[in-house]
Amino acid sequence: MPYKNTNTATMYMINCGGKLQDFRAPKIMGILNCTPDSFYDGSPNLTIDHLVRQAKKMQEEGADIIDIGGQSTRPGSKRIDAETELARILPVIRALRENLPEMTLSIDTYHQPVAEAAFTEGVSIINDISAGNLDPNMIPWVGSKKLPYICMHMQGTPESMQENPHYQDLITEMVDFFSKKLDECRNAGIIDIIIDPGFGFGKTIQHNFNLLKHLNAFSMLDCPILVGISRKGMIHKTLDISPAEALNGTTVLNTIALLHGANILRVHDVKEAKEAITLVEKMKEQK
């Protein structure tokens, strides 16, 4: 079914701890993984100094937000408890607040206690891959703090989501999911909601490309749209390359996402995402 692009990005603005992020131009969210087992950049030898240097590089290259994650959510990954996650992320958040005091930080977690502790240390956006489904306390707590909330679609859980993802009508089912979640979030008091279609989360490669092709369908929900396709399987499996070789493919698909209404690109490689945004915005200026 055809969808008309009614994206109104110029009207979107979210309050991040008193700092306004507007979407007259798309924003970049840099990925900072504090995990030993992330599919692309995880390492058991990560140090705080290394992560701070990585964050500073992302800031210099144009990142608007840095998203800190203490738990891998790649397909087949095993869940860790909140205590383990906190031990990974809290020292990093404190170091970033000291070294990059003006940077907007988000926390990638589905544990409400982790979100609360991160907020106490200066994080101002909650990025929840489960849209509140893995911790029923998450949405009410986010609402009580009036924090921006990234609400992602995922079929299943990271452990099982890629076993046999199935949809009767992918886009219609996802729009329905987000419509219900937006009602839940707003009823809980959440004002600033960002939707993330969840590329690779309970979706086949075909689903992912269908989702990208019809991304502008989600503009009807009147929320900023976050796209996270950086170095994912839809790229490296399609091209028969490794995630380390998937930067060019990532830039291609990020460009397509921008042309279809993406407001935030969540990426490992900030410089290339910034260039894609600059070029797409230059094209949009033309009459």
Image (cartoon, rainbow, N blue to C red):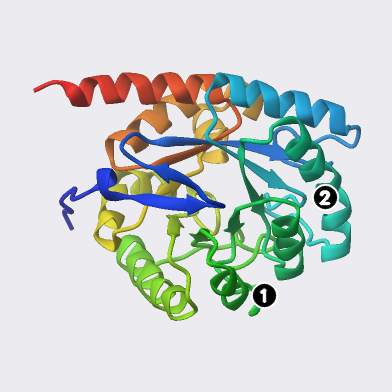
Report whether 202 appears left or right of 85: left
Q: Amino acid at mark 1?
A: Asp
Q: Residues within 10 Å of mark 1 (few under 14, many from 20)?
A: some
The answer to whether 184 is drawn above or below residue 35 in the figure is: below
Report whether 268 appears left or right of 275: right
Which image quadrant for residue 142? bottom right
Q: Residue at x 72, y 65 (%)?
A: 116
Please state which of residues 202 and 132 is positioned toward the viewer in this rendering. 132
Asked whether residue 207 is in view, the answer is: no
Tell me the number on the disc at residue 135.
1
Report whether 187 appears left or right of 23: right
Asked whether residue 82 is in view, the answer is: yes
Q: How many marks?
A: 2
Residue pointed to by mark 2: 90
Q: Position of residue 119 (x, y in %)?
A: 69, 58
Report whether 3 appears left or right of 165: left
- Mark 2 or mark 1, whichever is nearer to me: 2
Please state which of residues 80 and 243 is positioned toward the viewer in this rendering. 80
Which image quadrant for residue 41? top right
